[in-house]
Amino acid sequence: MGLWRQLRWRIIAAQMLVVLVGVVTLIVTADLLAARTVDPALLPVFEQAVLQALVVAALAATLVGLGASLLLAREILRPLRQLAISSRRIAKGHYDERVAVPVSDELRDVAQSFNQMAEALAQVEQQRVTLIGNVAHELRTPLAGLEGYLEGLLDGVLPGDPETISAMQHEVRRLRRLVDDLQHLSRVETGQVAIHPQVFDMVALAQRIVAQLRPQIIERRLDIVVDAPDGAVLAYADPDRTAQVLLNLVGNAICYTPEDGCITLRVRGDATCVQIAVEDTGIGIPAEALPYLFERFYRVDPSRSRASGGSGIGLTIARHLARAMGGDITAASPGIGKGSAFTLTLPRGQGDAGGEHDKMSARIHADATDCHR
Ligand code: ADP
């Protein structure tokens, strides 16, 4: 029974069955034909000759059948065995393991899919290792700051005055912000953030965000305008999450635009999409950095962003949210010192915004836009 479960023996048995059926059919048909067509006097000689031919043919067919079965079994089983060995190695953490791609179409498909899966696992593992390294690196800076202040206080080098305490509080806030961002990111990446799409007016949302942020804009000596067509531009998305994404984009624009700069929220809509671009006249982004902006912890100028408390996660979260709402975010910049534009695209809404604007304004919080404090 054990042997019967092995593919090799099943292939051999199938071939032998074909040989057996062939031999039996030949014997029966030869007998029947001989009885009708051969002279009875010659029948024994004829039967003898047929029998000899059959024995030779049966032996040859058996040998060829066995050889062919073994070759076929080897061709099928070797890659399968290799797959099993490689799977076990991957399970033990050897993510660089790959299998050779066989010639036959079906087995090639299996091997290629396996290699793709191994590649994806290797990438996930690499991301995991990088993430841990990044988190450790990000935690080290504020912790080292706090440690320095505490040592200074203990040694009496630093006075225990409000200024020192406020500097320590700043480091604690950075830690807190990083932990909050990480928690938010993990929820967004695992799809745990609830999205409640509805039809709302993007122009109204843009105007409310601008009104909300105006004091901060004035404080930083910037200007902000909404450029939109007359009337409503309806989007179909979660207004809370859209506000969150826009607050992040405008917050960055405020952060990276020097005094006397201008921020524009440009709203446009076509038959299927609504676009809102957050454009600034700020420090701009070099072309080589654009593809990495939405990666976790990526900052164009790490020292500058870290000094302002930026975790480098904001855009990652924003893009995840945009995609979860069926849209996306793209970034563009003509170059350093020439400003940047981040465009949020969302599905077009049909019908009526349903008086959501007033509710929406109450839900917009300014805390995400304070240039990372
Ligand atoms: P951070 O918290 O560091 O701002 P983000 O993910 O929001 O993280 O942004 C990632 C990086 O993208 C920033 O560190 C900055 O280098 C760059 N960036 C984002 N928005 C702008 C902008 N409007 N102008 C110039 N650079 C920007």
Image: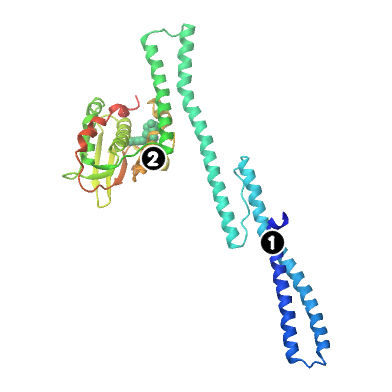
Residue at left 45%, top 17%? 146
Foreground pick, 355 / 284: 355
Decide: is 163 above or below 122. above
Circle 2: element type: helix
Q: Quadrant of ligand 1?
A: top left
Total residue callouts: 2
Image coords of residue 26 (percent x, y):
73, 80
Image coords of residue 5 (percent x, y):
68, 56
Decide: is 119 above or below 32. above
- What type is the residue that disc 1 sits on? Arg
Foreground pick, 237 / 264: 237
Label 1 neighbourhood size at 10 Å, few (<14), some (14-19), many (20+)? some
Q: Is mark 1 within 8 Å of ligand 1?
A: no
Q: Nearer the viewer, mark 1 or mark 2?
A: 1
Label 2 neighbourhood size at 10 Å, few (<14), some (14-19), many (20+)? many
Can you identify the residue that label 1 sits on? Answer: 10
Visible residue check, residue 173: yes
Q: Report, in whole angstroms, how far the alpha carbon at label 1 lies from the one at label 2.
A: 51 Å
Can you identify the residue that label 2 sits on? Answer: 320
Occupied quadrant, residue 333: top left
